[in-house]
Image: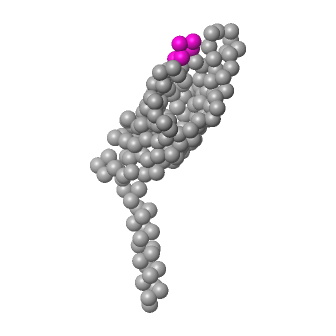
Amino acid sequence: MKKSMFIRGLAALAVCALALPMIGSLKNPVERPFKIAGHVSTVMQYDGSFAFDASSGSSVGEATHTGPFTASGSGNAFTGVWILTATADNGDQLSGYHVPGSSPDAFRFTSGTGRFAGVSGGFTYVTSVPSIIPNPDGSATLIISYSYAGTGTITY
């Protein structure tokens, strides 16, 4: 009898723990753990500016709560200011910005669409040593490629 009560109690606890992340919504946002990993390849102009487009496949990754995603962004390597929008396979989007001068590097969510409407949170990340090569098209630009991985929280 006591073993049966223990098992029921344990099962109830497990159901409650698993249900909390599922009931979050814009009216009832829930903070959740967030992990991300991906790869970026972009062309940097001589003034440090860069941009990448999701349609080119130059920025891809996978994150908890989005699954596989593509990203579009722009910024400046010299100022450390850049913004990014990640689009999940179902079309939901997450947008945010790199926090200039942060150590470790940090990213903050600012907006979202679909289930990410009203998003907040962010993550810290590390990057691989970037590969920097002259653009083979002969222009005064560089092709920069690197991988990154990060952890943090997301609230939606």
| Residue at horizontal 62 percent and vertical 24 percent from the top | 144
Q: Is residue 120 left or right of residue 132?
A: left
The picture places residue 150, in percent across and down from the top left corner, at 53, 42
Q: Residue at the spot x=43%, y=32% of the render?
A: 99
The residue closer to the viewer here, 3 or 145, is 145
Q: Is residue 106 above or below residue 5?
A: above
Would residue 122 be found to the left or right of residue 44 on screen?
Answer: left
Q: Is residue 98 left or right of residue 25?
A: right
Which one is nearer the viewer's eye here, 23 or 83? 83
What's the residue at 68%, 9% (across, down)? 138
Quadrant, the N terminus? bottom left
Q: Residue 84's x, y, as percent?
A: 47, 30
| Residue 89 seen in the figure | no
Left or right: 17 in relation to 39 = left
Coordinates of residue 75 in the picture (x, y in percent): 48, 22
| Res 39 visible | yes
Q: Residue at x 53, y 39 (%)?
A: 125
Residue 41 drawn at (x, y percent): 61, 27
Q: Residue 52: name its quadrant.
A: top right
- Most frequent secondary structure within the magenta stretch: loop
Q: Which residues are magenta?
A: 45-49
**From what the image shows, is residue 72 above or below residue 142?**
below
User: Is residue 1 rendered magenta in the image?
Assistant: no
